[in-house]
Image (tube, rainbow, N blue to C red):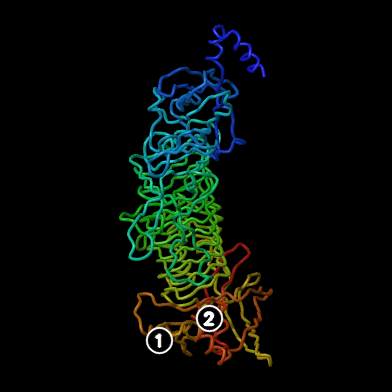
Amino acid sequence: MMRKILMSLCAAVMPLCAPLAAMAASITGGVYEDAPALALPENFTPAAGVSVALYSENGTLRLQSATDAAGRYRFEVAPGSYWIAVDAKTFRRATTSLPEQSYGPAGAVCAQPDGTTRSNFFAGACVAGRTVDGADDASSLNTSEHVAKIDVREDVRGVDFGFSFNLVTTRRDVRTQGSLRQFVENANALPGGNRMRFVPVRLAAPQRETSYGAPPRWWSIALASPLPELTDADTTIDGTPYSFVSPDSPLNPNPGLIDEPATIRPDQRFGRQERPDLELITSGERGIVCAARCIIRAIAIYGSPVSLVLRSDARLEHVLVGARADGTGIDRRGSVGIQIERGTTTARDVYVTEQSNAGIATATAEGKLDGERIDVRRCGEAAAGGGIILFSDGSVVRGSQVMENRGAGVIIGSADGKLAARANVIDSSTISSNWAGVLLSPAASGNAITRNAIMWNRVGGVVLAPYQTTVPQENRVSANRYNENGNRPIVLDLTAPPNVLAIPKQTCDRPADAPNRGMTAPEIRSVRLVRNDNGLARVIITGRACPGETVELYQSFVTSSVRDTAREQSTVIRSNETADRETLTAEGRRLSLPSIGEFNYAGATSTGPDGIFEAAFQITVRDEDRDREDDDTEEVSIWADEILRKGDVTDRAFSAIAIDAAGNTSEMSARRAID
């Protein structure tokens, strides 16, 4: 209203009002920090002291200002067309930190995937500014990255710009706006948590040729030199990609699951991990080093001998180590996938493969692993290294898969016995097709190996390593399922012949210099079958162990014909002369340590004061017609529920282990068939 009054007055005295007409409008706006990089004004905080320039339409510098404490700036102008340019290098006046643009006003010039630009019609997301791979040089309009063209007829308000120190927009490995390297520099320079938001402007590139279908796509960042260590707490490296036009909308150019077969049944999806969309090829001896608390999420990483080094509390989620983003192999194996040196590493949905020493290693007593849904494969060398190596106290691995490792699946404790490795738990996991299942090193004491499926491991299920002075004690090995392991399911007596199950001793002595205090296997004295009319039966097992012990019973078969082709299995030979032990012959295959068969946990009982125990289990009597129908319609499973249901009930046999109050566990006793 005031301007209209003044203009009316000027109509009468035009010569006197010429200067007023030339300064008849203003441009006001703000520069803000957009920490979450979502391009949403409600998340903005003022950025004070940022340099803002006003250019004429032809690029001539007209005015320059700096934002106030509220992040605001103002230019008084005559009507016309102008350019506003923001100098990103003046944010916080830090020498190493540099933000990337996330938001621009109407008229902002924004990069496009094909290298062209667009102008915002409305205020909103403007990721990376004018060019996705450019470096801001605010010395001229032509080299400025963060610009907007404003047409002025009257006052123009809301010419706002947003920038984020957490935004990664490019795959280039240079210290420039929007690079991963610059994000790490920013995180180290700026106190407090920094969470990377990956908003690539370029489209994901095809990564390899395929004989059919569309080629797989993902983003790949190749580092030319090692990344700086993460030194400020609560830094998150997150490879989840988001749309450049809507930075809160996730993308998924690399769909599917790691190790997903071409044809699957719905229940086979369980346990598989989604493929990441960002691949990081690291440089130097170590890939990402967290010297302070950190989070690593949704990336594939390989290239360095050690991919991840964790020296403080860390969290890993949906991380793939040692392979490309689709799970395919690489030319050179790493040494250690994840090396935990200090703090507790919480790992969820982590896949590690192709490491010559260890997939995951708690390399010192000061580091711990809390792992769930982790998958470690093809790590270690023959009889050396392995999938998971625990030199720690109190690590936990649960609900995971440790498979196909050239070394042991899990190694607890150091070979020299100097690192005690106590109170570690391996629970509810599949440990399969390794050199050994779980290897207990000297001084590995007080650990628990429970409820796992331990099968097809070449030299045994749970195996004691050779020791000299330090003796493993109080290791609880309980309620596991063992199947087709070479050697015995539990190997504590290194002097016993392979594949000879334990002979019960007639003593309850507990020598301190013997592994697990020399626990002796129970003696099963009778196995009786009591049939019912309803197709069910009970097995009643009696035997003797030492007083005060828990006795766990395991169901097996007199022969190992678990699968369709019985001749491919090893056969248990029993005779009157060797009634308390078992030997094996291999039919149809040759192995240095042939399979000793399956041992499926059935239940537990306790001994009385005299050491006598009794247990009863309900089982299903074989139904010939139903078995034939099942065999014709679905694959025969080796899991315990199928094993207990199929086969002639009179072919079944039972073994037992004993566990004392401290957790010391015996080897598996010789099997006894139903009487």
For residue 589, side relative to residue 621 (left or right): left
- Pick the front one: 247 or 433: 247
Which class describes the residues within 10 Å of circle 1: few (<14), some (14-19), or many (20+)? some
Query: To which quarter of the image does residue 465 belong?
Result: bottom left
From the image, state whether disc 2 or disc 1 is nearer to you: 1
- Residue 512: x and y in percent read 53, 61
Whole-angstrom CA distance, mark 2 to mark 1, is: 17 Å
Query: To which quarter of the image does residue 586 belong?
Result: bottom left
Q: Earlier in the sequence, mark 2 or mark 1?
A: 2
Image vertical order of residue 25 relative to residue 536, above or below: above
- Residue 389: x and y in percent read 45, 55
For the residues bearing labels 2 and 1, Cβ distance under 8 angstroms: no
Q: Quadrant of the C terminus?
A: bottom right
Q: How many marks?
A: 2
SS state under label 2: strand
Q: Quadrant of the N terminus?
A: top right
- Pick the front one: 355 or 512: 355
Residue 202: image tag: none
Residue 556: image tag: 2
SS state under label 1: helix
Question: On the image, numbered disc 1 is attached to which residue?
Answer: 567
Image vertical order of residue 369 relative to residue 631, above or below: above
Q: Amino acid at mark 1?
A: Arg
- Pick the front one: 366 or 607: 366
- Residue 559: x and y in percent read 47, 85
Q: Give the residue at x 42% y 69%.
A: 262
Residue lying farthest to the left in this orientation: 331
Q: Give the residue at x 60% y 73%.
A: 552
